Amino acid sequence: MSIDEKVREAAEAITRINGARGSVQSLSSTPGDFHLAIGAALAGNVAMKAITPVPASLPKPMQTPHACCGCLSRRQCLKLISTAAAGLAFSGELFPALARSRKADPDYVDPTRLRPRPRICLDAAILQQPRPYWLGWPGTTYNLDQRQKEYRALLAGSCQRLGIELHEEDKPIETESEFASFLKSVGERKPDGVVVILQHMNCWGWANRLANEAGVPLIVFAPIGTSFTGHVAAISRRTGVYVVSSLEWPAVEEGLRMVRAKRMFEETRVLWIKGQDRNETVLDRLGTKVRAIPRNTFNELFDKMPENEEVRDVASTFRRHAKRVVEPTWQDSLNSARTYTTAKRLMTDEQANAISMDCLGMVSAKVLPTPPCGAWTMFQDMGVTCGCEADLFGATSLMLTSYLLDRPGYMNDPVAETVKNLLIAAHCVSGSRIAGFNQKPAPYILRSHSESGLGVSVQVLWPVGAVVSLIRFQNPNELIIDTGTVVRNIDTPPAGGCRTSVEIKMDNVEDCRDVLGFHQVVTLGNHRRIVEDFCQLYGIKVIHSPEHTARANAA
Amino acid sequence: MRNRPSRQSQPICRARRFCALALLVAVQGRTEVTVTSPGLAPSRMDDRGGLVEDWGTLSVTVSGAGLPATAPVMVQGIRLDDRIPAAQAQSKQGPIALTLTAFRAPVWPAGLDVLTVRLAETAGQETPVQLSLALPEATRLGLKTVSFGGRPVLGLPAGVAVSQATREWGWADDALALPGWATPAVECDPAFRNIRAGMGGVPILYRFKVDPKAKANVVLGFCESFWAQAGQRPVICQVEGAPPQEVDPVARWGQHRPGALLFAASDANGDGMLEVAVLPKPGAADQNPILNAIWLFPAETLLNLDQVIAGKLNAVASRYVQVGGANDQSLAAGGRVEYALTLPARATRELTFLVACPGSSVPQPDQMTWTLEKLRQSAAAVWRDWR
């Protein structure tokens, strides 16, 4: 059963439970309507669950009819609207539908619009030699038509999944003049990337020419039977090129993800909230726009944000889904939810897609009653980067896990556990959907922000034994990546520091004190290969922590 | 109803309009134009076409046989791509039309000014010209950039060689002088206290004038004071005419310990310049090469390296350089960058310079991906969305 089918079935069931008039089909004349129906249905479901204790401070919703969806009561409709935002963090692929269903509220900011959606253009061609094939790989028994049909279908499917506009040569290129024409076309169209599928060993010369002359990132898929080691050894290590010599199509799709991620970087405007300056600059290589705005902008807007239904439901949902709530009071949760609505509003007003904020400075200056940790967790789970401490390259590192790996992570303060020789990665913000935006979230405990004792933060419980990657842009030209394994989650107390605190046994780093970087982003899974390939495609230098050597006690 | 001017008065009206227009052009032509990007501190182009930055003024002139020494300059504000505010200075010196166009590129973190110098030959005959960039006297010309007090302030266009006269010896790189950086733990020559460092992997490069094909003993001095463990900053030393040597100063001599390498050098290419370079070892953890001292001795000199390190042979050295220290100097004299160009008939030539604006430094060209096209696209995008 497909996800859509599952969703439809669930929606029908929920609609029946809610007693809403009309079937899903009757509401679903268009795909958009269908999503609306799913949203409505799910919201009803959440509304039913919400019968569980709700703080007395919540006002009763009005019982008057509401125009936005006639099939639901006013109460249900309000729940639908208000739960949508909170649901974003917990509803996986459904959150876009939920968010759309909030259109009735004129002040509502749809968070699904915050994640960048760039136009991505890809040119593609199959390279072959004139038929019939005889001796020489892939050989006369290689079924060219069948393989090419398969690969065209796979490419089209990948592009559709990733929202890439594909401009594919209708016929395989097999002559020098056809290749020259393709090369010229690429030069004129300037796509975001080129994919070539090699169907003969003698096509490598063209692949090399594309690498030299096309001037755009090149993905070469060489199915087994079209290369020897000598063909790929040099070109596969070249900047601007990603070579897949394999039968594994998912590896090719990873290449397309790299192109998409780069375009998402280019499409992103990050709000750099700190100090007094207001300006806008652009990062080299990544192309990300950095709009610096005065720090007070955030707290002044926060002061104006109402404690409305959305805020209450975000707060309620965030608490309800927690494994435990330790310190945060209901008022703390409301404040935290207001930082969420504040950030949404601010990003929308500034046409931005991400935030990097001097949160500690704001807490220190007591201009906010809560750090934004809880809200940042929600955004991370939606694929919207919100980073801590105005660390711009911490934020770009978070973007990389979001845009390339489709999962959140957390930027950490690295601590050496010298007795067990482990790295402790600690911070008060972590996404909970650590296995992917569409996957089940990890359990989390609601805590206060550790250093200040204020507001709402999370301790996300990372799976013990899982492999993690630590990723950090030092600057747009240089990135650190290491991997390790989660040993345990550390509680505070007895530890001090930050709420999400994970012990990691590092791979290929003999001494935990030698782990490079600060605010490296911890993300679930071993992503070393894809991240390194992304860096090669875009000319970013990759650094690993030293395996054996120790750093000096130097100046 | 408004009366039409009489037939007799129409020429007067036209003359008035012409005068007003001429006045407007004249006023525009003598004005200053600011160059900025949203929220960034502005620079300005002065009424002579000089780009005025927080480190000084960059002026561009053209000279050559038969060209007038000066020409009137018209400065005006324009918009590039219908969006980007820019300053433009135009002048015509005989057959050469010179157009300077400057705009602010919003390069993170503080922006960069982009100056395009366009030369056009208008008389239909090939013309040799000297293009000169006048800079503050304290600026120093490197390999790819010009620095001012250690701050790279001007990025030079790739593929065009500068043509100015050079000193007898000096550095010709984009490395950074760090006086007092090293702390030698033993008595040694004072040169070991200073370094030049090739931050970001740029090579350290010196040139010394010698007789063509001359031979010399070259000694390079090192003192590593950052790393305590071996293997972090090995460097490769290339001295003309001698086999290259790789050295890891900590492995060979220890942290804070001065050491020296001897090279039997020669002017192998016979150009009358002896070249000394220190490069990072590819793959090394620290890619910033350093160098503390250079000695050149006559080829026949018998050398005891301990005595060289102690500074006891300075007097017999033909050159003694405290790299990054008191007696160091650049190969080219400061304050000027010159290009000898030949413009074919009716041809145009454009050179683009990146210029540090208030608060910014120019990145090393091989450590960035900015192109003129990307810079303009970024500027247009920022202006488009700025509110």
Image (cartoon, coloured by chain):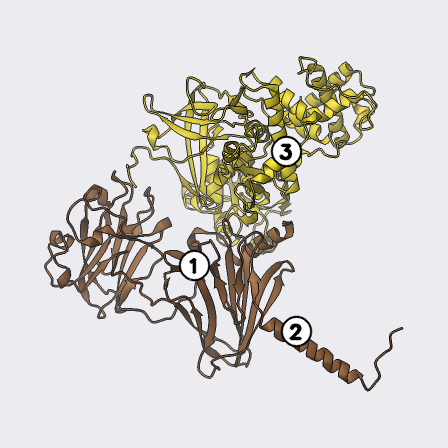
Considering every residue shown, the one lying at the far top of the view is A52
Per the rendering, the colour in which chain A appears is: yellow
Are there few (<14), some (14-19), or many (20+) residues within 10 Å of tag 3?
A: few
Say which amino acid is labelled 1. Val
Q: Secondary structure at mark 2?
A: helix
Labels 3 and 1 in the same subunit: no
Left or right: A58, with B117 as reference point:
right
Q: Is residue A499 visible?
A: yes
Are there few (<14), some (14-19), or many (20+) residues within 10 Å of tag 2?
A: few
Among numbered discs 1 and 2, the one appearing first in the sequence: 2
Give the number of the mark in front: 3 or 2: 3
Q: Secondary structure at mark 1?
A: strand
**Residue receiving disc 3:** A303
Q: Chain of mark 3?
A: A
**Residue receiving disc 1:** B153
Query: Residue B215 in the image: x percent, y percent?
Result: 18, 65
Considering every residue shown, the one lying at the far bottom of the view is B8
Image disc number at residue B24: 2
Between residues B121 and A300, which one lies in front from this camera angle? A300
Between residues B377 and B322, which one lies in front from this camera angle? B322
Mark 3–mark 1 contact, CB under 8 Å?
no
Q: Which chain is brown?
A: B
Q: Chain of mark 1?
A: B
